Amino acid sequence: MPSKKILIITGDAGESFEVLYASHRFRESGYQPVIAAPSKKRMNLVIHDFEPGWDTYVERQGYLVESDISFDQVDTADYHAVMIPGGRAPEYLRNDKRLIRIVQEFAEAGKFIFAICHGIQLLVTAGLVDGKQITCYEHVKFEVESCGGTFIGQHQAIKDGRLVTGQTWQSHPEFYKLVFECLKEESLVA
C-alpha cells in the first residue's frame, strides 16, 4: 500500500487557514501531514482576508506553526501527494532550487500535486502549467498564461491530469472535494 503521508509545502508568510486546514483535513482522513519549509523552524504564518472597498487582499499576522522537516530532508518517494498552500510564502519559495526540484519530482513520479491560491506560483516556476487548465488567485493569472497555462476563472477548483488547483481559501469546499476524490481514486488503484 502506498504511503499515507502528504507533504505540505510552506514557509514564513504562508496563509494560516490554508496550511492549517490542509493539515487538519488530511489528519482527520487518516493521512499523515508533514510540513516542509526551507529549514526546520517555527514559522510565522499570515491571514489574507478580503475587505470591502479594497482592490486586493489585506494581510494580518497569523498563527505560528512548526515545520516538521526542511526541504533538504524531503524524499518524494515517502509521500502519497504534495499540497502547496498560498499566502506570500510561494513568492520567495519559488526561488529555492531545492523546492522546485521536489515539486518536479512529484510530477515525474505521476503523483498528485494540489495547489491553491498563490501556491500555483510554484507550479509555474517548476514548469508544470504549460498546456494545463489552471485556476488560482486572479493576480496569479498572468503568470499562468505567460507560461502556457489556460486560466479557468469560472471554477473555484479544477483538476487537470495529476494537478488540482484552487483559487483561494474561500474555494476550500470545491478544492478539497477534488483533492479527496483524487486520493480515493489513488487508493483504489493501489
Image (cartoon, rainbow, N blue to C red):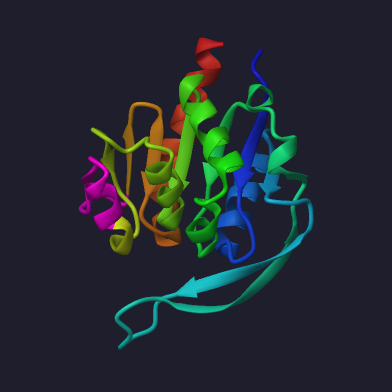
Task: Assign the N terminus to one quadrant of the image.
Answer: top right
**Image side of residue 171 versus residue 109, left or right:** left
Q: Position of residue 52 (x, y in %)?
A: 33, 86
Q: Quadrant of the C terminus?
A: top right
Which residue is located at x 60 percent, y 64 percent? 16
> Which corner quadrant of the image does residue 70 belong to?
top right
Span highlighted in magenta in the image: 141-156
Asked whether residue 29 is in view, the answer is: no
* 57 left or right of 73 in image: left
Please report the residue visible at 30 percent of the width from the left and 48 percent of the height from the top: 135
The spot of residue 112 in percent (x, y) is 48, 29
Q: Quadrant of residue 19?
A: bottom right
**x, y (%) of residue 51?**
39, 83
Q: In front: 98, or 27? A: 98
Q: How many marks?
A: 0
Residue at 38% in and 49% down: 166
